[in-house]
């Protein structure tokens, strides 16, 4: 029972911290407006670890690689902690375990990215029905625009209804199936 509680706490704290780092990375990458409460919250929450990491890990083409690497590292630490609490022994297959954990951390980052896009599209669709001029709309638009534009070019609105969010959600669900399958294959190493 104690192990379950510790796994829950570890998953909650490190999972949410990794999510905050990943959101900060994508908000910087997609040039989301900085003057909103979410951006300022993410910077305040993660700045203590991102600033020192930036001194060691340089950015590349406008991408803050230190934040992305920290999100991946948080996922790897989370997976390692969960496996240790479940009683997995790392002694005999250290190399395979490290490679497997690194790949599982990458899979979790990809899965979290897909969920971020999914939630942003749903929130944007719901807010467009009830309150399209909310202060949060520009942030959601910066998250969803790169994905929706690709579909909008190929599928025009039908009867003034934009179906691009629906198609993007279906594509994300299909990608989640693929990512989950890859995660199961990698987890067979353990």
Image: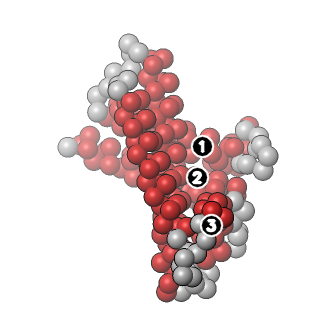
Q: Secondary structure at mark 3?
A: helix
Disc 1 secondary structure class: helix
- The one nearer the camera, 125 or 2, is 125
Q: Which mark is residue 152?
A: 3
In the displayed structure image, the side of residue 171 where residue 1 appears, left or right? left
Residue on which disc 2 sits: 21
Residue 94 tag number: none
Q: Is residue 52 visible?
A: no
Label 3 or label 2, whichever comes before in sequence order: 2
Crowding at label 2, few (<14), some or many (≥20) Cα neighbours within 10 Å?
A: many
Position of residue 145 in the picture relative to residue 72 (left or right) = right
- Report the front residue among 144 and 158: 158
Q: Position of residue 25 (x, y in %)?
A: 64, 53
In this rendering, the label closer to the viewer, 3 or 1: 3
Q: Quadrant of the N terminus?
A: top left
Residue at position x 48%, y 24% in the image: 98
Q: Are discs 2 and 1 less than 8 Å apart at CB?
A: yes
Image x and y of residue 157, in percent: 58, 75
How far is mark 3 from mark 2, CA to CA?
30 Å
Quarter of the figure with residue 38: bottom right
């Amino acid at each position: 029972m104690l192990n379950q509680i510790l796994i829950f706490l570890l998953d909650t704290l490190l999972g949410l911290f990794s999510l905050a780092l990943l959101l900060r990375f994508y908000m910087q990458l997609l040039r989301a407006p900085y003057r909103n409460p979410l951006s300022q919250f993410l910077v305040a929450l993660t700045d203590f670890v991102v600033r020192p990491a930036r001194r060691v890990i340089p950015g590349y083409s406008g991408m803050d690689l230190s934040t992305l690497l920290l999100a991946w590292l948080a996922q790897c630490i989370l997976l390692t902690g969960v496996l240790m609490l479940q009683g997995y022994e790392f002694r005999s297959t250290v190399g395979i375990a490290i490679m497997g954990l690194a790949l599982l951390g990458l899979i979790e980052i990809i899965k979290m990215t897909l969920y971020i896009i999914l939630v942003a599209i749903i929130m944007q669709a719901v807010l467009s029905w009830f309150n399209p001029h909310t202060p949060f709309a520009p942030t959601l638009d910066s998250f969803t625009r790169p994905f929706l534009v690709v579909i909008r070019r190929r599928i025009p609105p039908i009867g003034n209804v934009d179906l691009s969010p629906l198609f993007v959600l279906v594509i994300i669900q299909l990608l989640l199936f693929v990512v989950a399958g890859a995660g199961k294959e990698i987890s067979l190493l353990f």
